[in-house]
């Protein structure tokens, strides 16, 4: 009753992981009946489990009424639904539904077969206005025939779909070729496409997808997930060729659990050597078999100033020698786009590597080295080092020149002030350094109006003196009045 009367509740997720007896089954049905009266829920998810089997058919009756009558409902998900009529009940509810269509339908682990996919897609072909923009059918039992019916609908109304999820099904290369060719020619609005957890696909399936998209490479979805299908070098090369033909990079490419080795990775990245700006912004290589040469190839790409890579995940890969680690981490120093790096459990996240990363993010050997350090990286796996976390937190500021100034001031002036830094400076350089330091402290003020006034004030050394320790403040006053400093024609 509380849920039924709550007008602020927008998301409801129900999980049933226990076996229901007679009384609890009756109470569960009453619960669904009451919940179905709430017309403000926008996102509904039911995780059935085997304990839900006893009342699943009856429950679908209440859920059907909920879908038909709730005009605000946007997404509907059933996971572990084992009743064969799940698609029939859903189609019936969508046919009688009032208001706008659902934005997303998810049927995972629900035993959806080829005939069920045919029934669903036939309904969408006859009623395209009621088709959802996103559909996920992960871990079901349909194969190439189901892919054929999906591609048939895509060819007719391809611009409707923005996301298609087909992980863990039984399709092969033929089914993937059929659906990929339909997506390449007709699904210009598709943003996410995911397949995986199917070892029948392999290289032939990836090659079929790559060849279908190679004709119209800009139609490749922005988020492409190909996981756990054992991609070989030929498949990686075909995929790289298709991606390298685009006029702009895709947002993410997920290649987890594919047993990718050095040779396979080199086949992919070789396609971007001439134009590294087209490499995906997010590259997920979790739980693969990368070694020395794979890491070297990635490092060489990161050293290229045109590289567009922003997130690199290499967790759970094979350990590599420290020299390779040093080469890889030092490549980050030259990079100005990489924001997240995850190399947690591949032998790289030890104390020695953290010290190396610290010197890359903030090299304190000289002012010039600190200025040229990496000011972009904001996340390094699940790093527990407090020093690294503080340095990465500084890098989160979008104003990179302000980050560089902050590091220079803190590590060379305010933290451990050293007067010898000024002794060998030329007069003109000394004036620039003092101006640079003052502006850094002025920018640290949180009050914007105070910043503007401080920038226009001539007697601002008093304010700087309050921000610095006494020795640095006195040094500023001495240097201000030093007759050696040349400023224009005046001494």
Image (tube, rainbow, N blue to C red):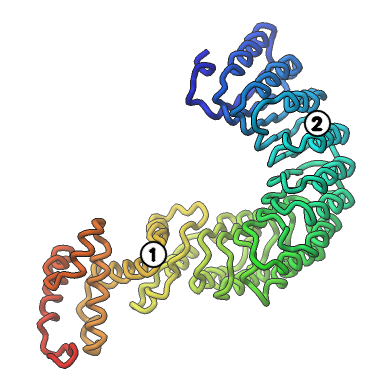
Residue found 67% across the figure and 68% down from its top: 247
User: In this rendering, is residue 420 above or below 73?
Assistant: below
User: In this rendering, is residue 167 above or below 94?
Assistant: below
Asked whether, in this view, residue 85 is left or right of residue 485, the answer is right
Residue placed farthest to the top in the image? 23
Residue 243 coordinates in the image, percent (x, y): 72, 65
User: In this rendering, is residue 128 above or below 422?
Assistant: above
Q: Which residue is mark 1?
A: 399
Quadrant in which residue 150 is drawn = top right
Q: Which mark is residue 66?
A: none
Q: Which residue is mark 2?
A: 111
| Numbered disc 2: secondary structure | loop
Quadrant in which residue 184 is drawn = bottom right
Residue 446 coordinates in the image, percent (x, y): 26, 56
The quadrant of the image that shows the C terminus is bottom left
Asked whether, in this view, residue 22 is left or right of residue 446, the answer is right
59 or 140, which is in the foreground?
59
Asked whether, in this view, residue 194 is left or right of residue 462, the answer is right
381 or 33, which is in the foreground?
33
For label 1, count other residues whose C-alpha is less than 10 Å away and answer few (under 14), some (14-19) or many (20+): few
Residue 486 coordinates in the image, percent (x, y): 18, 90
Q: Earlier in the sequence, mark 2 or mark 1?
A: 2
| Numbered disc 1: secondary structure | loop
Residue 141 visible in the displayed image: no
Tag 2–tag 1 contact (CB < 8 Å): no
Residue found 55% across the figure and 75% down from its top: 305
Residue found 84% across the figure and 32% down from its top: 119
């Amino acid at each position: 009753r509380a849920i039924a009367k709550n007008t602020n509740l927008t998301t409801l997720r129900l999980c049933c992981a226990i076996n229901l007896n007679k009384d609890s089954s009756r109470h569960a049905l009453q619960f669904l009946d009451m919940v179905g009266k709430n017309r403000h829920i926008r996102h509904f998810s039911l995780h059935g489990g085997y304990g839900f089997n006893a009342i699943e058919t009856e429950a679908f009756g209440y859920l059907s009424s909920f879908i038909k009558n709730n005009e605000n409902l946007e997404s509907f998900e059933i996971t572990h639904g084992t009743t064969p009529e799940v698609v029939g009940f859903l189609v019936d509810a969508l046919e009688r539904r009032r208001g706008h269509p659902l934005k997303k339908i998810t049927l995972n682990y629900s035993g959806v077969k080829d005939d069920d996919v045919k029934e669903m897609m036939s309904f969408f072909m006859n009623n395209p206005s009621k088709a959802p923009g996103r559909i996920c059918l992960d871990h079901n039992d349909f194969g190439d025939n189901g892919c054929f019916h999906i591609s048939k609908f895509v060819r007719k109304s391809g611009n409707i779909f923005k996301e298609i999820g087909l992980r863990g099904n039984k399709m092969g290369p033929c089914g993937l070729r059929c659906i990929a060719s339909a997506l390449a020619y007709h699904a210009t609005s598709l943003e996410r496409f995911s397949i995986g957890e199917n070892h029948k696909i392999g290289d032939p399936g990836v090659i079929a997808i790559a060849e279908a998209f190679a004709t119209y490479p800009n139609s490749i979805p922005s988020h492409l997930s190909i996981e756990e299908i054992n991609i070989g070098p030929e498949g990686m090369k075909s995929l790289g060729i298709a991606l390298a033909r685009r006029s702009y990079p895709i947002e993410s490419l997920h290649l987890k659990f594919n047993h990718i080795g050095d040779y396979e990775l080199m086949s992919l990245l070789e396609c971007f050597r001439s134009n590294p700006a087209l490499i995906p912004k997010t590259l997920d290589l979790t739980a693969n078999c990368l070694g020395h040469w794979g890491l070297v190839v990635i490092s060489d790409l990161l050293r290229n100033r045109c590289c567009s890579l922003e997130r690199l995940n290499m967790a759970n890969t094979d350990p590599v020698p420290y020299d390779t680690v040093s080469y890889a981490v030092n490549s980050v120093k030259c990079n100005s786009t990489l924001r997240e790096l995850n190399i947690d459990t591949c032998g790289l996240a030890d104390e020695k590597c953290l010290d190396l990363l610290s010197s890359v993010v903030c090299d304190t050997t000289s002012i010039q080295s600190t200025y040229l350090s990496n000011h972009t990286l904001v996340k390094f796996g699940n790093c527990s080092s407090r020093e690294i976390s503080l340095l990465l937190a500084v890098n989160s500021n979008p104003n990179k020149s302000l980050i560089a100034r902050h590091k220079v001031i803190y590590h060379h002036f305010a933290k451990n002030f050293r007067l010898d830094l000024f002794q060998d400076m030329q007069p003109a350089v000394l004036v620039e350094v003092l101006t640079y330091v003052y502006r850094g402290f002025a920018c640290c003020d949180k009050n914007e109006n105070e910043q503007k006034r401080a920038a226009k004030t001539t007697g601002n050394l008093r304010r700087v003196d309050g921000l610095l320790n006494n020795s640095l403040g006195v040094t500023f006053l001495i240097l201000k009045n030093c007759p050696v400093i040349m400023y224009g024609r005046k001494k």
